[in-house]
Every structure is written in C-alpha cells, then in structure tokens.
Image (tube, helix red, strand yellow):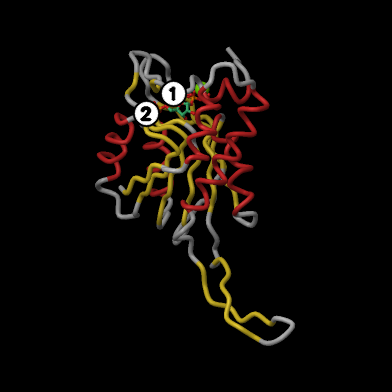
C-alpha cells in the first residue's frame, strides 16, 4: 500500500480548525469539504484518461477525457458523506456508490448496515471516502468489499490516520492484487483505550451531523 500524508500549510491550517473542539458543525462541514477538494487534487493524479480530439475556435488539437467506465466514489456513511461534495467538486461526473458502516465501540469490529454499489466493478478505479482511519477495521472491510467485486485500483482518502490503522491496512491489503493507495490530510500519534485517534478531532460523524445516541 502506498501512503501519502499531505504536507501543505493550507491543509495544516484547515485541519487545526477542524480539530478545535469549539468549531461548530456548519464550519466543520465546510472545512471538511475544502480539505477533501485539496486532497482530491493529489489523489486523482493517476485517474484514467484517454486521448480525444478537441476542436478549438482556431484548430483541432489533442486533449484528454476520463475513460469509461469512469471512477466510482464511495463515501462510507455516516462521516464519509461529509466528504462527498468536496470530491464531486473535482470529479463531477463520477458515479457514487454508498457503504453504510458502523464500528462496534466495544469490540471495534465494523458492521455493514447499508450497501448500494454496482454488482461488478471490473476495471473501475474506486475512491473510498472516510475521514477517520483509527483501528483500520472499517476501511479494511470496505476495501475487501470493492476488491471482491473486481475493483482494479483503490484509493482511500482520509482526514486523520492513526499509525495502528495504517499498519492494519498494510497487513490486510498485502495479499490484494489491486493497488491500494492512502491519502491522508494528517498522521496522528496513536489511538487511546477507546480506539479514538489522539490528538484527533473526536467523533467525526457527531461533529458533522450531531450526536444520535
Ligand atoms: O478505523 P476504525 O477503528 O474502524 O474507525 C473508523 C470509523 O469510525 C467512524 O465511524 P463510526 O463507526 O463512528 O460511524 P459514523 O460515521 O456513523 O459516526 C469513522 O467515520 C470510521 O468509519
Ligand atoms: O477518533 C476517532 C475514531 C473513530 N471514529 C471517529 O470518528 N473518531
Ligand atoms: Mg461516529
């Protein structure tokens, strides 16, 4: 697995505001979108394109367009939904599939409660969105799901990643044929005893959408 951690002052600045416990939900949602758009620029560097002829007002020239079938964007509900708009800003024509997953807060085992994806993903590049890579259980399960359906290449985009989660993903994806790449806005120190990323930003889903239980 290739791992890229962003190194850009604007990303660090936005991430610092996101971490701040006083940042309210509307601001948190806006900053999440902005951060994803910045990350998506790098994360789509290898998006598949093909050559096309373009007629300008002066002449014809060679341009490129996204190949078909195009990339599939997969936000992991709930918190990943907050990243969708920022991704669509750069990839407006991409199809979107959904995975609803929740981590059991005692065992840290992820459970899938909703799935709306194409049956087959052969040849598709997939961009998985989830702001938090903590133990890695959720993303590992999501990646497995996409690989089983034939995804050709998987790029995960996160805001914060813990070293424990990266290690887990590296282990769990080692046997996979499809290349897996992780882009994260920040790499944090560790997980605490509750499986939360430290220093982190708290529960991303709650900060985006409020506390439901
Ligand atoms: O790496 P892991 O240890 O699996 O933890 C990370 C997962 O936990 C959070 O989701 P949560 O289960 O809180 O669901 P939510 O998005 O509905 O809040 C987060 O958005 C990730 O999906
Ligand atoms: O720090 C964490 C860990 C898991 N899920 C979150 O939303 N935050
Ligand atoms: Mg949550």
Q: Which residue is pictured at 30% across the width and 47% down the height?
A: 1
- Horizontal arrangement in the rendering, residue 138 relative to residue 37 (left or right): left
Q: Can you name the residue that lies furthest to the front here?
A: 9
Which quadrant of the view contains residue 212?
top right
- Name the residue that disc number 2 marks: 188
- Dot 1 beta carbon under 8 Å from ligand 2: yes
Asked if the residue at tag 2 contacts the one at tag 1, i.e. Cβ–Cβ closer than 8 Å, the answer is: yes
The 10 Å Cα crowd at callout 1, few under 14, some 14 to 19, many 20 or more, is many
Q: Which residue is pictured at 51% across the width and 31% down the height?
A: 15
155 shown above or below 168: below
Q: Secondary structure at mark 1?
A: loop
127 shown above or below 114: below
Residue 185 is marked as none
Q: Which quadrant of the rendered structure holds the C terminus? A: top right
- Name the residue that disc number 1 marks: 200
Expressed as whole percent of the image width and height from the top left, the position of residue 174 reads 25, 46
Expressed as whole percent of the image width and height from the top left, the position of residue 202 reads 49, 19
Which quadrant of the view contains residue 70?
bottom right
Expressed as whole percent of the image width and height from the top left, the position of residue 173 reads 30, 44
- Tally the marks: 2
Q: Nearer the viewer, residue 130 or 187?
A: 187
Q: Can you name the residue that lies furthest to the right here?
A: 57
Upstream in the sequence, badge 1 or badge 2? 2
Q: CA distance from mark 1 to mark 2?
A: 7 Å
Q: Can you name the residue that lies furthest to the bottom here?
A: 59
The 10 Å Cα crowd at callout 2, few under 14, some 14 to 19, many 20 or more, is some
Q: Nearer the viewer, residue 123 or 10?
A: 10
- Horizontal arrangement in the rendering, residue 101 relative to residue 109 (left or right): right
- Horizontal arrangement in the rendering, residue 66 relative to residue 112 (left or right): right
Q: Secondary structure at mark 2?
A: loop
Q: Which residue is pictured at 48% across the width and 35% down the height?
A: 12
């Amino acid at each position: 697995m290739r791992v890229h951690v962003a190194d850009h002052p604007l990303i660090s600045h936005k991430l610092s505001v996101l971490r701040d416990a006083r940042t309210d939900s509307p601001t948190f949602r806006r900053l999440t979108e902005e951060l994803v758009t910045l990350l998506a620029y790098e994360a789509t560097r290898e998006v598949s394109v093909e050559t096309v002829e373009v007629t300008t007002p002066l002449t014809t020239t060679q341009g490129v367009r996204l190949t078909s079938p195009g990339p599939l964007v997969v936000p992991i509900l709930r918190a990943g939904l907050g990243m969708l708009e920022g991704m669509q800003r750069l990839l407006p024509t991409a199809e979107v599939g959904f995975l609803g997953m929740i981590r059991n807060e005692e065992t840290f085992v992820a459970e899938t409660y909703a799935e709306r994806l194409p049956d087959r993903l052969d040849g598709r590049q997939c961009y998985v969105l989830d702001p938090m890579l903590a133990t890695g259980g959720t993303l590992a399960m999501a990646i497995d799901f996409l690989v089983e359906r034939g995804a050709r290449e998987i790029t995960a985009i996160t805001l914060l990643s813990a070293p424990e989660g990266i290690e887990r993903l590296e282990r769990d994806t080692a046997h996979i044929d499809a290349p897996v790449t992780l882009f994260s806005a920040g790499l944090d120190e560790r997980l605490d005893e509750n499986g939360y990323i430290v220093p982190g930003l708290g529960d991303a889903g709650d900060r985006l959408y409020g506390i439901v239980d």
